[in-house]
Image (tube, rainbow, N blue to C red):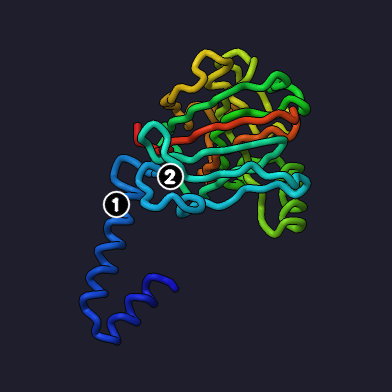
Amino acid sequence: MEKPKLIRHIYRGRNWIILIQVLCFLVVFSSNARTGSVIEVGKFSGVRELEGIPQGWEPLTFRKIKNHTRYTLVVDEGMRVVKAVSNRSSSGLIRKISIDPSEYPIITWQWKITNIFEKGDVTKKQGDDYPARIYVTFTYDPEKLSFMEKTKYKVARLLYGEYPPQGAINYIWGSKATQGTVVPNPYTERAMMIVVRSGKKMLNTWVREERNLYEDYKKAFGTEPPTISGVAIMTDTDNTLESAVTFYGDIIFKKQ
């Protein structure tokens, strides 16, 4: 039920106690999700019940991949986080959200991996797996595309019912790639891979990351970024046929 309809229903019933509770909930929810200087995209540490997937998030699956990574809320080292278990599988969790990257350019998150992949290779399709990935998608903006690119997006809309993201930034924990490497995804040039961490050095250790997404997009694509349309976490092992257990902490966007 939509918020205005809910409030009208309560008002007609003159149940003022419930009305006050609902209004307080909406104020608290709004302040938790967006304050003046931050947007809490994934406030996993604030969940009360360790059941299902985090509120506001949904599965991100791919048509030709049947085996899906399993995501659960757990407590690890005293923190409430998301645990990903992948075994020859691929899928993610996505939060669909609209954010202006020029206003909130800084993204911070925490992650912990327990292993890397022997066959992982950021430059090849058969090595396109990562124990940990933060996946940021951007809204389709026809003004930033050529005629041919617009045509491709129109065809995609006819097939899938909506425009696909115009681009994506993937912050990855690579297996062997040099930290700082920026390359197109081997499947599509509309997704850029940025190697934030690599190798075994920080295995089984919680690491906090901070990136200027606005600047990363401009360097990767050579243009101003469109509006952010979604943020996802993903642990995938379908190409290397390996396995992984990974943990994800809070994901927050901040002003400069």
Give the spatial CA distance, label 1 vs label 2: 12 Å
Quadrant (top left/top right/bottom left/bottom right) for the N terminus: bottom left
The mark tally for this picture is 2
- Quarter the C terminus occupies: top left
In the figure, residue 181 lies in which quadrant? top right
Q: Quadrant of residue 75?
A: top left
In the rendered image, residue 137, in percent from the top left (x then y), is placed at 57, 41
Is residue 210 among the parts visible in the rendering?
yes
For image coordinates 63% across by 45% down, the residue present is 165
Q: Which residue is mark 2?
A: 41
Q: Position of residue 130 (x, y in %)?
A: 63, 28
The answer to whether marks 1 and 2 mark residues whose Cβ atoms lie closer than 8 Å is no
244 vs 65, nearest the viewer:
244
Q: Position of residue 192 (x, y in %)?
A: 63, 29
Per the image, label 1 sits on a secondary structure element best described as helix
Could you say whether the residue bearing mark 2 is in a helix, strand or loop? Answer: strand
Q: Amino acid at mark 1?
A: Ser
Q: Residue at x 28, y 44 (%)?
A: 36
Q: Residue at label 1?
A: 31
Q: Is residue 140 above or below residue 88?
A: below
Q: Is residue 204 above or below residue 13?
A: above
* 73 on left or right of 129: left
When the figure is inspected, residue 81 is found, relative to residue 206, above or below; the finding is below
Is residue 102 something that shows in the picture? no
